[in-house]
Image (cartoon, rainbow, N blue to C red):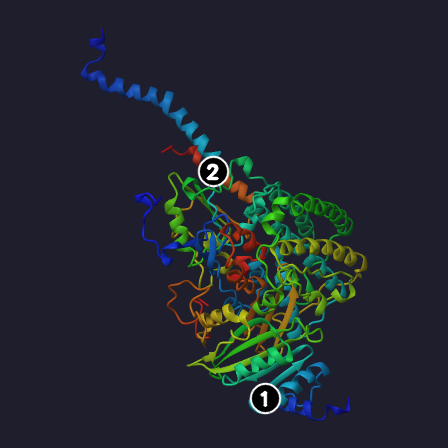
Amino acid sequence: MLKDLVNPSTFNVLVGKLEDVLVKAVEKPLGYAINWGRLWSLWPVHLETACCSLEFGAASGPRYDVERFGIIEAFGSLRQCDLVVVQGTVTRKMAPRLRMVYDQMPEPKYVIAMGACAITGGLYFDSYNVLPGIDGIIPVDVYVPGCPPRPETLIQGTMLLQEKIKRSRFR
Amino acid sequence: MSSHGGQPEEGSQAKAEAKPETQKPVEIPPLEKGIIEKITERFGDKIKFVYAKPKRIRFNVKTEDVMDFAKFLHDEVGFDQPISVAGVDYPKENIIEVVYHIGCCTKPEYTSSVFAFALRLPRDNPKTPTLIPVYRGVEYHEREAFEMLGVIFEGHPRLEKLLLPEDWADIPPLRKDFNIKGR
Amino acid sequence: MGLPPSMQVEESEEGRILTISVGPQHPGSGHFRLVVKVDGDIIVGADPDPGYVHRGEEKMCEYRNYIQNIPHLERPMIADSCGILYPFCLGVEDIANIPVPERAKYIRVILAELNRCIFELYWLGIYGIFLGHSTMFMWPMGDRELLIDLAEAATGARVTHAYFVPGGVRNDLPENFKERAIRQLDYFKHRLDQYKDIFYNNPLFLDRTKGVGVLSAQDAINLGVTGPVLRASGVKHDIRKIEPYDVYDQLDFEAYSMNSGDSYARAYIPLLEMYESINIIKQCLEKMPSGSVRTKLGPNPRGAAGESFKRVEAGRGELAYYLVSDGTPKPYRVKLSVPSFRQIPAMPHLLKGAKLADMPAIYWSLNYWPVEADR
């Protein structure tokens, strides 16, 4: 009877069905678990780019506590962080350093562009030393507008990033 | 005070050179008058008096005399705290002005005044001796004036870029012929 | 007994000195790079490298008129935005001969003192975390939010208020501001006493900052440092006392100075200044007359050709603006003389000969904010 089941014509169908069963039983829950672990422990790099860093600091304070979302400013090395929050204006002197920091982080990594200056250059659009947005040097996941964005807006931005991670395939 | 005779007319004449419209003589307050008399007594007409408002005095100095002037200001008159060094570009007169603002911390009667002296340098070759031997705090201010306007301070230990990126290849940005793109 | 073969290497004088770059990506530096040369554990040289946030404020000022300049001029120090706009407004009022109503002067003093407290609490929080005291990060951050609530009720924005304009302030204070402010300030004073207990009397803090980084009065004056750093070295130089602007000459407060010149004194004076700020705000709330808060200006205000130099005591020290006007609505030259930039020469001077572990204590006690120094 097994010989009847496993013959060349039905083999592909069997393998296909096996793949379905494996995806449903193993990959989906495994992916969900891995993504769950990632999105509740986003560790930002300790890189402050400009004035929005004050509101990021205020967001770590007791009123708008971001630590409950798992975002702890890990004071260790940047090799163990997976989130870069570009806080504010990026000048031409800071841009190569930002790219170097981004390259050193391990995969998977996420970027939040915080503040109008990081999105399009903002208030300093006509300055001789300011980049018009950081899209040109690193790929951005979430844009958080504001000048500076309120800490609650930053938290909404991180929640959007969490949605994005939840929906993505784990790598 | 009846002894106002000499100073205000001199002052108003110098003012009349700078601003031809106002002709009436301006009274100089007594504290500033004392400082001005001390300085003109020592330097005479090597320096030019520009204005004296309450608590603000300004003179124009030449590059050959600026070192003696700064030493005299620091040791004899008592202004000892460097506040800032500003460079201003006047392309119409072909001049770059470097204005030093000095405050006083030790003499109680002078602490609220700010003394400004300015050097008028030719625009195509702005060179002046550095004042670090007298006021140590102007080191970084002079470095910034060098990178923003191109003024060369002779004797400065390190004339390099401070605030601009290391690979800046354009003309000094605070000059008036540097136009921001799109404006 | 000699060294094992693996340790027998040629040691030269050069080889012993190590150059460390405490760069922009570092928990202990902020947006600033400090290149230090160390010989073992002793720092032999330090070279500050600012400019990572240089946005060209002074050039941008020449393309906007006086009122359009207000939003971007307050960004170098967004927590103390009233303090950094104050001398600009005073300078424009001087050039264009704009009178300011009495009530506006009192409101300006109240907001300037509130902003001073808001900035000093942030500074204290970061100082706590540099020295490893994480409670001292959380407590000032929390108390700061209450003062920011007050500022938000008055101006409409959390940090960048854009509230001071040449001619007064933009709008009046809300109805119940006085009662609310007095309640908050009483609670704040009680908290400051608690900070003294957990931080300033903490034996670890005393060990790390007493006698560390001593700056003599002569050096302090000659290097051009200002603010609490100057007052900690024994020089009584507070602009609010020696050249009072707005209504500071009608208020009764003290300007403190200490004689030791070490990091502890530089950290203690801001605490005393916060006590005085509470005092000043309460006096202003009592004495404030009623009336208008803004002089109506025509479009494109301008003044005669001339220059003006006005200075103010901001949270970090003496902030001055040198304004040159040529008779048009746009300024010809705006030069900001910020206290953080004037503190830079003190860094190589104090770090030479210090131990590497003392570097955060000395560097942050100089009250240096990199965004402001770069403008």
Percent position of residue B23, x then y: 66, 90
Label 1 neighbourhood size at 10 Å, few (<14), some (14-19), many (20+)?
some
Give the farthest residue toward the front: C1
Q: How many labels does the image show?
A: 2
Q: Quadrant of residue C104?
A: bottom right
Above/below status of A99 relative to B143: above
Q: In this view, does A43 lie to the left or right of C321?
A: left
Above/below status of B2 relative to C109: below
Q: Mark 1 points at which residue?
A: B43
Q: In which quarter of the image is residue C329?
A: bottom right
In this rendered view, identify the residue nearer to me: C274 or C344.
C344
Confirm whether residue C94 shows in the render.
yes
Q: Is mark 2 on a helix, strand or loop?
A: loop
Q: In which quarter of the image is residue C213?
A: bottom right
Residue under mark 1: which chain is it in? B
- The CA span between labels 2 and 1 is 68 Å
Indicate the amino acid at tag 2: Leu
Confirm whether residue A135 shows in the render.
no
Residue under mark 2: which chain is it in? A
Residue shown at the point (34%, 19%) measured from the top left: A21
